[in-house]
Image (cartoon, rainbow, N blue to C red):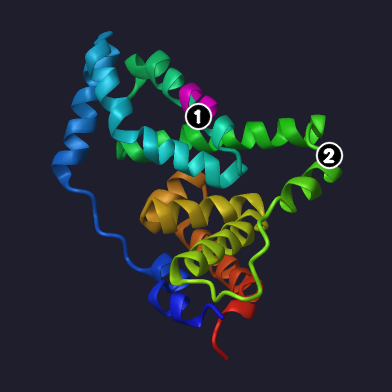
Amino acid sequence: MFSAVIAATPFYLKMEADPSSPLSDECTLDFALMERVGEGDHAAFRQLVERHQNSVIGTVAKMLGNAAEAEDIAQQVFLRIWRNAKRYRPDAKFTTYLFTITRNLVYNETRRRSRKKEVSSDEREENSNLTVEASPDRQPDAEVLQAELQRKVDEAIASLPETQRMAVVLRRYEQLSYEEIAAVLKLSVSAVKSLLFRARTSLREALSGYLDD
């Protein structure tokens, strides 16, 4: 049913596309802003947040599946950046530093959820059933099909093991290079490629019902 939509949106091909390198002046700007933040410059901090908050919120939301919590954790990410700005050294791209902090806080939240089990399986099932049934006498348009496909993709990503999920989000949505992902996850580049290969295989299987034979 979704073959036409998927043909226009090759998910795993996009994930494997070689992301273009960020412009050097973008990196230079981040470094300059961090230097000013380290000196207590609130305006520079606001600019840094405005530059990167959408990426952080999006990454956290895709990892945890909760937009409200994503904003809270994003605030914690930037609070840590503010507090540690004086000790920051531009040894790598700022985004590597940023997503390393994001990863740590996401993993902490995952562990906390696991311990407290705040959301019961019954609540998850109830929430998962809050969908609008399609009318049997109307053909869903391309926009509806695209939305349904995106929901299935999100569910498939959410089902991946945590480290695989983070690798996919950083590669697919944030367009980080293998080297940057390796730095964020504290893995070798070959290990990152292996993670993404296994994730791709799992996603193909999860989405097999929506693909052409």
User: Which stretch did the figure color magenta?
Assistant: 71-76
Q: What residue is shown at x 54% (from left), y 87% (from top)?
A: 212
Say what amino acid the circle numbered 2 marks: Ser
Please tell me whether residue 4 is drawn above or below residue 101 in the rendered image: below
Of residues 27 and 165, the one drawn nearer to the viewer in this rendering: 165
Of residues 173 and 25, the one drawn nearer to the viewer in this rendering: 173
Residue 150 image offset from top left, x and y in percent: 52, 61
- Which numbered disc covers residue 174? none
Q: Secondary structure at mark 1?
A: helix
Please tell me whether residue 173 is drawn above or below residue 137 in the rendered image: above
Image check: 19 left or right of 4?
Answer: left
Q: Secondary structure at mark 2?
A: loop
Q: Residue furthest top?
A: 40
**Quadrant position of residue 173:** bottom left
Q: What residue is shown at x 17% (from left), y 48% (from top)?
A: 23
Image check: 20 left or right of 121?
Answer: left
Q: Is residue 177 magenta?
A: no
Task: Tell me the residue that label 1 is attached to.
Answer: 71
Q: What residue is shown at x 33% (from left), y 14% (from top)?
A: 86
Please tell me whether residue 26 is drawn above or below residue 35 in the rendered image: below
- Which numbered disc covers residue 120? 2
| CB contact under 8 Å: marks 1 and 2 | no
Q: Earlier in the sequence, mark 1 or mark 2?
A: 1
